[in-house]
Structures are given as structure tokens and as C-alpha cells.
Amino acid sequence: MGIADDAQNKAEDLKGRAKEATGAVTGDEDLKNEGKADQGLAGAKEKVTEAADKVKEGVDSLKDKLTGR
């Protein structure tokens, strides 16, 4: 994964925060909850991206050991 994924996840998190804040100010509970959900989804995507990066690092390390690098 990469910088583009990180940026997209951050943008989704910020969008969620904006929705939550707007919902709180206007008293729109649906919008507020939608914002919280957007933030949760962005956080979950970030965790998946981090896990995928760790797996890739492990695979690369194993390949290096097997090839003698």
C-alpha cells in the first residue's frame, strides 16, 4: 500500500469528522452518526493497510534470507 492509500484514509477520516461536527452543530443525529461511521471505516482501512504492509515486509525479509541477500 502506499502514500495514496494513507492520504485517502486521512481524507475519509477528515470528512467523517466534518460530518460529525456539522451534525452536532445542527442537531442532525443521522449526519453525526454517519460522520462517526465514516471515521470508523477510515480507521479500519488504515489498520488493514498497516497489516498488509507488515505482511509484505515479512515476505520480503523471508525472500532475502532464502536468496542470501
Image (cartoon, rainbow, N blue to C red):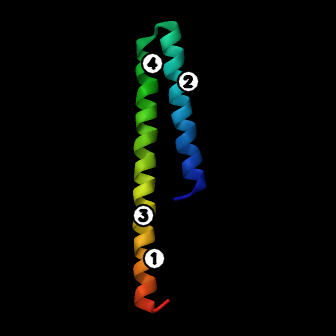
In the image, what residue occupies the spot 44% across and 55% down?
A: 50
Any mark on residue 54, and which? 3
Callout 1: helix, strand or loop? helix
Amino acid type, label 2: Ala
Q: Are marks 2 and 1 in contact (CB under 8 Å)?
A: no
Image quadrant where residue 62 sits: bottom left
Any mark on residue 69, and which? none
Residue 38: percent from left, percent from top? 45, 32
Q: Reading the chain from its start, which is encountered first: label 3 or label 2? A: 2
| Apparent side of residue 64 relative to residue 22 in the rendered image (left or right) | left
* Marks 1 and 4, how far apart at CA: 42 Å
Q: Reading the chain from its start, which is encountered first: label 4 or label 3? A: 4
Q: Are marks 1 and 4 in contact (CB under 8 Å)?
A: no
Quick one: label 2, few (<14), some, or many (20+) residues within 10 Å?
some
Q: Which residue is mark 4?
A: 32
* Marks 1 and 3, how far apart at CA: 10 Å
Q: Reading the chain from its start, which is encountered first: label 1 or label 3? A: 3
Q: Which residue is mark 2?
A: 18
